[in-house]
Image (cartoon, rainbow, N blue to C red):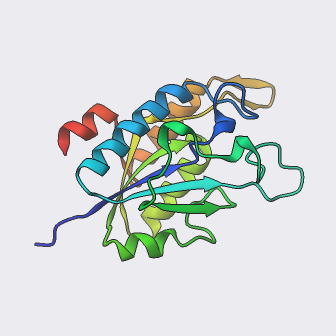
Amino acid sequence: MKQIKQGLIVIDVQNDYFSGGAMELVEMDSAASNCAKLIDHFRKNEMPVFHVQHLSVRAGATFFVPNTHGCEIHESVRPNEDEALIIKNYPNSFRGTELSDRLKTKGVDEVIICGAMSHMCIDTTTRAAFDLGYKCQVISDACATRDMEFNGHIVKATDVHAAFMAALRVPFAEVLSTIEYLAAT
């Protein structure tokens, strides 16, 4: 029986999402702390870590603008020199990147996903990974989002996050907390 090989994908944990950044998220410090715990676990167990950095190249972009402090990966989760850094320009971490090739090169068939934003890049990347045949786990408390607005109604970040985690649960991913994931590995 083939052993499943896991890879950690850390998406867009960048300065603009933290306090004082151009697109501050709710509970980003807590999510980043849990991302750091996952990275530490993967490093200690010599499992591959893939860092994803979004650079906004579209006209009128207001955050993750190239060559700014805001687009840099946050110090709490900076890649080691031997870890993959994937640069993306779209919410889907696979679109126009070498992420799938890098995962295949490392023999990864199950991805553990964390980072930001729950309703955008986490959702889009998880669905894409599922479509590409990867088994997926999303670490819910290692993800963050923000309040959203629809037709004048403000949807709180906790509700946005819960709705997207619920939507990803079946069939796209197993959704776990950091503690649940670490206890199971």
Q: Residue at x 82, y 43 (%)?
A: 62
Q: Residue at x 40, y 33 (%)?
A: 34
Q: Is residue 100 above or below residue 67?
A: below
Residue 33, percent from left and from top: 44, 31
Q: Nearer the viewer, residue 28 or 158?
A: 28
Whether residue 175 is visible here, answered yes or no, is: no
Tell me: 118 left or right of 114. Answer: right
Q: Nearer the viewer, residue 127 or 177?
A: 177
Whether residue 146 is visible here, answered yes or no, is: yes
Tell me: 90 left or right of 173. Answer: right
Residue positioned most to the left: 1
Q: Is residue 17 above or below residue 136?
A: above
Q: Is residue 29 above or below residue 86?
A: above
Residue 24, percent from left and from top: 68, 30
Tell me: 122 left or right of 38. Answer: right
Q: Residue at x 47, y 26 (%)?
A: 30
Q: Nearer the viewer, residue 98 or 134?
A: 98
Q: Residue at x 72, y 23 (%)?
A: 154
